[in-house]
Amino acid sequence: MNRVIALGMVAAVLVNVRAAESMLIDDFSDQGGLSRLETPWRLVTDQVMGGVSTGRISFNEIEGRRCLCMDGDVSLDNNGGFIQVALDLAPEGALDAGKYEGIRLVVRGNGASYNLHVKTVDVRRPWQSYRGSFRTGPEWREVLLPFSGFVPYRIDVPIDLRKLRRLALVAIGNEFSAELCVAEIGFY
């Protein structure tokens, strides 16, 4: 019996340590659209480079949860193929996420796959990023994206977690109708 109690205490301690090592980026409770970092979310589409994809960003309440929603149509015409909602992580400079394992999301959507792109101060070109993927479903679900699983895209520099400057939730690469809602995003 003592072993069961001891194991229960150890598990409780591990849970508390993990909770202490997390950081909420946004729960979308600010009605003005600012993140917990006091930076705004922005919609960006491939129209910045001549594409024709269309998108919308909105702040809603779904099943009692405040959330950010991105929807639209991704088109590959004119060498396009993305819509995204992006957030600068620090007004100036970079955010140090070196003590975290990855990014935690609470999401729902239309069943499609989406990307989370991270940029550091070392990323110089708009198309460069470190990318993780996740799939949505019709119910709210928690997604953990460990930094070790992020893949560099068109950049040879390893990701430096002490120098994060931006993240984006992205619908990319295929022609489809995007529908993604996020109730929480943070580091774990």
Image (cartoon, grey):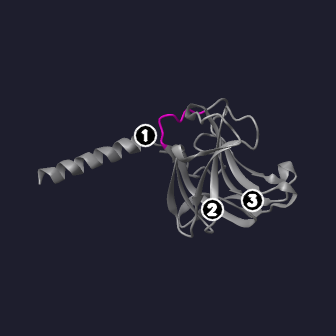
- Residue 107, quarter of picture: bottom right
Give the mark nearer the N terminus: 2 vs 1. 1
In the orientation shown, which residue stands out farthest toward the top?
Answer: 93
Residue type at numbered disc 3: Arg
Q: Residues within 10 Å of mark 2 (few under 14, many from 20)?
A: some
- Where residue 9 appears, x then y in whole percent? 23, 47
Give the mark nearer the N terminus: 3 vs 1. 1
- Mark 3: which secondary structure? strand
Report the span colored magenta.
Answer: 95-101
Can you identify the residue that label 2 sits on?
A: 113
Mark 2 vs mark 1: in front: 2
Instruction: Give the camera-side residue of 12 and 176.
Output: 176
Mark 3 vs mark 1: in front: 1
Confirm whether the magenta stretch covers residue 88.
no
In the orientation shown, which residue stands out farthest toward the left?
Answer: 1
Can you identify the residue that label 3 sits on?
A: 56
- Where residue 78 appears, x then y in whole percent? 87, 57
Mark 3 vs mark 1, CA separation in Å:
33 Å
Mark 3 vs mark 2, CA separation in Å:
18 Å
Q: Does residue 104 appear to the left or right of 84 in the view shown?
A: left
- Where residue 2 appears, x then y in whole percent? 12, 50
Give the mark nearer the N terminus: 3 vs 2. 3
- Identify the main secondary structure in magenta: loop
Q: Does residue 156 appear to the left or right of 127 in the view shown?
A: left
- Mark 2: which secondary structure? strand
- Mark 1: which secondary structure? loop
Can you identify the residue that label 1 sits on?
A: 21
Q: How many marks?
A: 3
Residue type at numbered disc 2: Ser
Q: Residues within 10 Å of mark 3 (few under 14, many from 20)?
A: some
Residue lying at 55% horizontally and 50% vertically, measured from the top left: 185
Contact, mark 3 vs mark 1 (Cβ under 8 Å): no
